[in-house]
Amino acid sequence: MNTEELRKLDASGLQKELDSLLKAHMGLRMQKATQQLSNTAQLSRVRREIARVRTVIQQKASQE
């Protein structure tokens, strides 16, 4: 999801997106630990997405 799509979501939608990204990140970390992860760049992408979602949540909280 890009930043514009994230800004259109409400607080519950952002929280759901954050939860799903955190679960995906945990799964990727487990795959890396068991040496089953072939594309390690996925970890960086998911971490960046988590940071984007958290940033948008913080921006929305400061506007209210």
Image: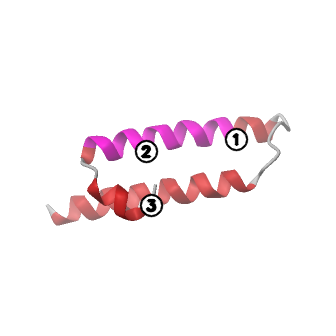
Q: Secondary structure at mark 1?
A: helix
The answer to if 59 sits in the magenta stretch is no
Q: Which residues are magenta?
A: 12-28
Rendered image: mark on residue 29: 1
Q: Position of residue 34 (x, y in %)?
A: 83, 34
> Which amino acid type is marked by label 1?
Arg
Q: CA distance from mark 2 to mark 1?
A: 16 Å
Dominant SS type (magenta): helix
- Viewer-side label of 3, 2: 3
Distance between the Cα atoms at labels 3 and 2?
13 Å
- Residue 33 position (above or below residue 59): above
Q: Residue at x 34, y 47 (%)?
A: 14
Asked which quadrant contains residue 7, the reply is bottom left
Task: Give the image quarter of residue 63.
Answer: bottom left
Tag 1 or tag 3, which sits nearer the N-term? 3
Q: Is residue 19 above or below residue 51?
A: above
- Which residue is most to the left? 64
What residue does disc 2 label? 18
Residue at image x 67%, y 51%?
43
- Tell which tag, 3 or 1, sits nearer the viewer: 3
Which residue lies under the disc numbered 3?
2
